[in-house]
Amino acid sequence: DHLKDLLKYLRYGRMSKECLQEKIAKNCLVIKDSEASKMIQTMIKENKDEFENQNLDGNGLPVGISPFAIRPRVPNQVMFAIGGWLEGVPTTLIETYDVRTNKWFESKMSHKFPRAYHGAQEINGIIYLIGGTNGSEILNTVHCYDPVKNKWYQRANMFEQRCYVSTAVLDNYLYALGGHNGLQRIRTGERYHYQTNQWHKIPEMNLSRSDACATVHNGMIFIAGGLNDQIIENSVEMFNPVDSVWTFIQPMSSPRTSLAFIAHHNSLYALGGNNGFER
């Protein structure tokens, strides 16, 4: 009695045509129920058409708009790539990665302000874009994106213009560190509280850094590498928000700018970058 309702919840886009045609369509319960049989034949046709149209996801499986059961499941997490440098200019392009389909999709809701060499962080499901450049000026602006409401909002400007800025989130505070203000590389930092929409200055780092990278580990902020004047740094310093003090820790083995720096399983990882001679 419940066969028709049950069949609506199968994800036909995950099935092969052979499975649909040989196992489901020829099942005795399906054959006896005309509505169920018609539903399965529709799914077989949709499945076949999607393959022929090459509308496939990153796993080589069909992705359809209708009927609903052809679509992949809605992912519980999505990765965003926002802005950057594209074809000689900063871009407004946003792409999202769906781990369930192993595919990148271009977002229909692009950021209307082009931005490159900026910071990007997430707080409570809201994505913040910090500083960077629009190609003609260095920015101190901050915009945030609510993926659920699909809306952009402008937030309070930073004290300083910051391109090649390093950012981190600790205890729901957003930190913007160093960068280039259009005249020089800077070592200042500031902290943003999203509930009050206000920036506050924090003590300066020991060194000026642009194009460095920051991460959070054990309640501390770590920032590594970057450019200091014309020197590519291998130094790493740590900020303790309790006493607001910056302290040098063991430097990296290699100088790095434009690096990725993350905390994972009680270790800090410095990945890639430019050492002054090669990437």
Image (spheres, rainbow, N blue to C red):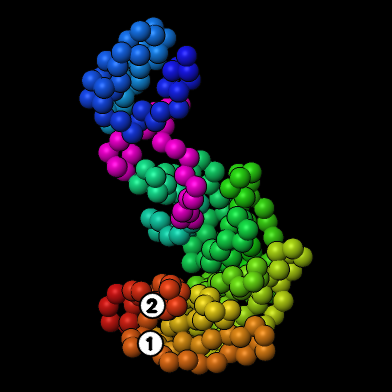
**Which residue sits at x=28%, y=82%?**
277
**Front in this rendered view, residue 160 or 22:** 22
Q: Position of residue 206 (x, y in %)?
A: 55, 92
Q: Is residue 217 above or below residue 235?
A: above
Q: Which quadrant is the C terminus positioned in?
A: bottom left
Q: Considering only vertical position in the picture, is 242 above or below 211?
A: below
x, y percent for residue 147: 58, 48
Q: Work out whether residue 222 can be spotted.
A: yes
Amino acid carrying mark 1 in the image: Met
Instruction: Check contact, mark 1 vs mark 2: CB within 8 A.
Output: yes
| Residue 141, x across and y down, in percent | 64, 64
The residue indicated by pointer 2 is: 270
Find the magenta span and give its range.
55-82
Type of secondary structure dominating the magenta stretch: loop
Quarter where residue 33 is shown: top left
Residue, x 45% and y 16% (percent of image)?
A: 4
- Disc 1 crowd rating (10 Å Cα; few below 14, some 14-19, many 20+) is some
Amino acid carrying label 2: it is Ala
- Which residue: 30% across, 30% down? 15
Q: Position of residue 79 (x, y in %)?
A: 46, 53
* Rendered view: 64 above or below 76: above
From the viewer's perspective, tell me whether residue 87 is left or right of residue 249.
Answer: left
> Which residue is the site of mark 1?
252
Marker count (numbered): 2
